[in-house]
Every structure is written in C-alpha cells, then in structure tokens.
C-alpha cells in the first residue's frame, strides 16, 4: 500500500506526486523522490522496479521478507534491510523495513511494523539543509529512527530484569523466576539478532570506501553505529546478568533445601531419643525402668524430656532449628 510519494529539490519539498510521474521527476537535476510503501504486493513492487530501475535480487528479498539485517550495493544504489522491534503487551513484535536508496531516490518498504515513519519525513523536511544532502541523508534518517526505537525496548528489558532480581532475593516463586529469566533471555536474543548484523553492516557506510550516496553523510552513519555499539554493550550486560541471576537463584534454592534438610535432621535426632529409650525399656509400664521401681516411669519420661530438650537447645543455638 502506498503511504506517500513526494518529490524534493535542493532539500525542499516540491509536491506529492503520482507514481506514474516518478520517472519524470528523476530526470530533473537536483531532484530526488522519496516513496514509502507498507506491506507492498507484487504489482506495486513491479511498478517501483520499473520506475526506479531496482535490481531484481533486491526486489526479491524485499518481497520475500524475513531477511537478515544487511546492507548491499548494486552499482550506485544501496539496498538495506533492518528489523523493527517493538513491545506489545509485554511481548516483542518483529517487523522489517527494506530501503532502496539511489542517487536520486529513496524507497522504503515496511512489513509487519506497528509504527510508521511519518515522523522521520517531517523531521527531514524541517531540516532542508540536511535534506539537501539527498538520498544518503534520508537513508540515515530512516536507519536512525529504527535504531532509536531499540532503546525503549532494551530499557524495558533492563527494568524487567531488575524486578526479577528483587523477587529472587526475597525468596519468592523460585521456579517462576527461572522461567521469566529464560523468557527475558529469549527477548534479548531477539533484539540481538536485529542489532548485531546491522552493526556490522553500518560499518560499510563510513570510513574507507563507501557508496557514493553516503559520502557526504559518513559522520551520521558513524553516529548510528555508535548507538548500535551502546545497545550491543547493554545486551551483553543483560545476558551476563541473566546468567548470574539464574546461578544465584539455583544457589538460593540449594541453600533453602539445605535448611529444610537440617531442620528435618534435627527433629529426627530429637525423636530418635524417644525411640531409643522406648525401645530399651519396652514401655509396657509396670513401674520401670528396672521393672518394679515405683518411680521408674516418671523418671524415664523425665530423662527423655531432658535429653530431647538439651538437643533442641543445641540445634537451636547452632541455627539448625
């Protein structure tokens, strides 16, 4: 579906144009066309391929979807694939943005993404001195918008991890904590799969040999890569913290089980005293111990109570009870 199709010249918006007029504006000096599509079908992509002269392999990747984040060069044009990651009801919603950028055009194709890029276009139009740099700046603006949307996601993951850590040290729902930690690990891996390949790809747009359209905006792409480095570092921290939290959780479970074992052993030792004395004297009661002694029974009970009381005192003092 066509979102918008706009022609620009010298950094200023000329007008919204019909798709059929794209080739006419591409022929004008100092003019470039910025088209945005959402969930494009084959007919729309075929029309765009005809108007912009897109490479068939790039068009095939954009239509097929589910591509790894990447940046590829086809002559003077660049084809970039980025993953959008958004939070929806506590779960990560994945989308994909394919961007075709040439000397005088930019075509973005968005799939399964909840958020659009109208704000990116408005921001670019408010900065005509930057928009004047052409399609390279538009490619940067789109990439920067995608990367900036990773920050709220990673902040939500960090906050969720903090809550889980608090529950761990409160000794609550240990099994649930482990399940949530593994769920959080899955989410962080999902975000990492979007960040790491893009981090490697963006390095091709600044320093050394770069595509022609990126020549004037290398510093901007370096800034995007810096943001990706920061996100990647925070993901490493989350991964390490999750591993540590799982180990701590398991250690606390082991400690708790040890405490229970000590309590059971203490009570077993105390009741063993009753069992031992009862087994020794038989406890058939006809006076006892030594059978016919009138004070035998109360003395036997007193001995058992005293010994058990002493054991209870010792276990309590040592922290087993």
Image (spheres, rainbow, N blue to C red):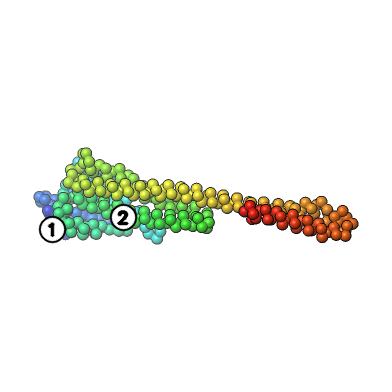
Q: At x 23% / y 44%, what residue is drawn?
A: 205
Label 2 or label 1, whichever comes before in sequence order = 1
Direction from residue 305 to residue 248 in the image, left or right: left
Q: Which sits in the foreground, 254 or 210?
A: 254
Q: At x 71% / y 55%, what residue is drawn?
A: 310
How far is the residue under mark 2 from the one under mark 1?
Answer: 29 Å
Q: Which sits in the foreground, 303 or 242?
A: 303
Q: Is residue 232 visible?
A: yes
Q: Residues within 10 Å of mark 1 (few under 14, many from 20)?
A: some
Q: x and y percent of residue 189 in the render? A: 39, 48
Query: Splitting the image into 4 quarters, where does residue 19 fall?
Result: bottom left
* Label number found at residue 295: none
Query: Splitting the image into 4 quarters, where does residue 12 fall?
Result: bottom left
Question: Circle 2 is placed at which residue position?
Answer: 149
Q: Which mark is nearer the camera, 2 or 1?
A: 2
Q: At x 25% / y 57%, what residue is drawn?
A: 117
Query: Splitting the image into 4 quarters, where does residue 309 fall?
Result: bottom right
Q: At x 30% / y 58%, what residue is drawn?
A: 115
How many marks can you see?
2
Question: Circle 1 is placed at which residue position?
Answer: 14
Q: x and y percent of residue 316 in the render? A: 65, 55
Specify the farthest residue to the left: 29
Q: x and y percent of residue 31 in the render? A: 12, 52
SS at badge 2: loop
Q: Residues within 10 Å of mark 2 (few under 14, many from 20)?
A: some
Specify the farthest residue to the right: 292
């Amino acid at each position: 579906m066509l979102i918008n199709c706009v022609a620009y010249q010298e950094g200023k918006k000329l007008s919204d144009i019909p798709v059929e007029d794209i080739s006419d504006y591409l022929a004008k000096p100092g003019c470039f066309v910025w088209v945005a599509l959402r969930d494009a079908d084959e007919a729309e992509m075929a029309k765009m391929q005809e108007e912009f002269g897109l490479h068939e392999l790039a068009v095939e990747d954009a239509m097929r979807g589910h591509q790894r984040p990447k940046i590829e060069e086809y002559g003077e044009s660049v084809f970039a694939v980025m993953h959008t990651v958004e939070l929806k009801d506590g779960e990560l919603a994945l989308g994909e943005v394919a961007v075709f950028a040439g000397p005088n055009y930019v075509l973005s194709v968005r799939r399964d993404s909840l958020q659009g890029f109208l704000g990116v276009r408005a921001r670019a139009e408010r900065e005509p001195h930057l928009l004047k740099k052409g399609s390279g700046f538009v490619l940067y603006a789109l990439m920067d918008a995608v990367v900036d949307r990773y920050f709220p996601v990673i902040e939500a993951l960090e906050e969720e991890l903090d809550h889980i850590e608090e529950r761990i040290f409160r000794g609550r729902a240990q099994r649930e904590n482990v399940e949530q930690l593994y769920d959080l690990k899955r989410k962080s891996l999902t975000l990492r799969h979007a960040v790491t390949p893009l981090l490697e790809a963006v390095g091709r747009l600044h320093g050394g040999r770069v595509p022609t359209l990126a020549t004037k905006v290398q510093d901007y792409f370096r800034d995007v890569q810096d943001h990706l480095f920061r996100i990647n570092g925070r993901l490493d921290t989350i991964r390490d913290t999750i591993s540590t939290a799982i180990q701590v959780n398991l250690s606390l479970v082991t400690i708790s089980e040890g405490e229970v074992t000590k309590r059971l052993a203490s009570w077993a030792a105390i009741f063993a005293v009753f069992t031992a004395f009862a087994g020794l004297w038989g406890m058939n009661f006809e006076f006892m111990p030594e059978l016919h002694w009138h004070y035998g029974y109360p003395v036997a009970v007193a001995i058992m109570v005293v010994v058990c009381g002493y054991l209870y005192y010792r276990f309590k003092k040592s922290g087993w009870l």
